[in-house]
Amino acid sequence: MKYWIFKPRPEFRLADWLRESSWLSDDRLADVWERESSDGQPEAGDYIFFWYEDTLETSGIVAEGKVTTLPGESPLTGRKQGYYKDKNKTRKANGVQQTAVQYIRLCLAQPVTAKDLEEGEATRTISLSQKQQERALEIPEAAGKYIEVLLRSRTTLIDLTYCQNG
């Protein structure tokens, strides 16, 4: 099992997609993400943390998911198009791989920020640059476990839930 951080393109409204999607609790549906193929390949059973880029205060890890096998066709793909800031924008198909994810935990109200990562010994070397959009960045197991602790400290339930303030 490996841990990854995925940073979607900034024109995709990730927080809105997660906040407004009633399908999240349906464990039969997987969210399929396209990513550059130049990075490593997350495999079924790996964990992925989703980084949302917004303001300094609200940018951070907003979701945790577990990689699952790709469905034949995802019913969510068409719905996802409406969450791009520029709805007419198309992406290159060359060099793109797909990763299917089932969400475990959402942390939209209180994301794990870059400052949180800098404060952790296991995570302080993680750097998320602009060049890492649509890439899965493999992180050390100790860093993944630390991020899981941070996310769990901001939630009240073990299953899929929104983080609570305070």
Image (spheres, rainbow, N blue to C red):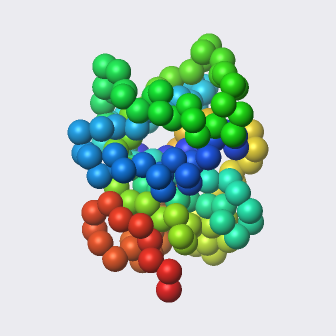
Residue 70 appears in which quarter of the rendering? top left
Front-most of residues 70 and 150: 70
Q: Is residue 149 visible?
A: no
Front-most of residues 137 and 15: 15
Q: Quadrant of the N terminus?
A: top left
The residue furthest left is: 28
Residue 115 appears in which quarter of the rendering? bottom right
The residue furthest bottom is: 166
Q: Position of residue 83 (x, y in %)?
A: 58, 40
Residue 57 appears in which quarter of the rendering? bottom right
Front-most of residues 98 and 78: 78
Question: Would you place residue 149 above or below residue 49 in this image?
Answer: below
Question: Would you place residue 132 above or below residue 153 in this image?
Answer: above
Count of marks overlaid on the render: 0
Q: Position of residue 103 (x, y in %)?
A: 37, 50
Identify the residue at image location x=41%, y=67%: 162
Q: Position of residue 132 (x, y in %)?
A: 68, 40
Identify the residue at image location x=44%, y=71%: 163
Identify the residue at image location x=66%, y=17%: 92
Identify the residue at image location x=29%, y=72%: 157
The residue furthest top is: 94
Relative side of 89 to 22, left or right: right
Question: Would you place residue 121 above or below residue 100 in this image?
Answer: below
Q: Position of residue 98 (x, y in %)?
A: 47, 26
Q: Is residue 36 visible?
A: yes
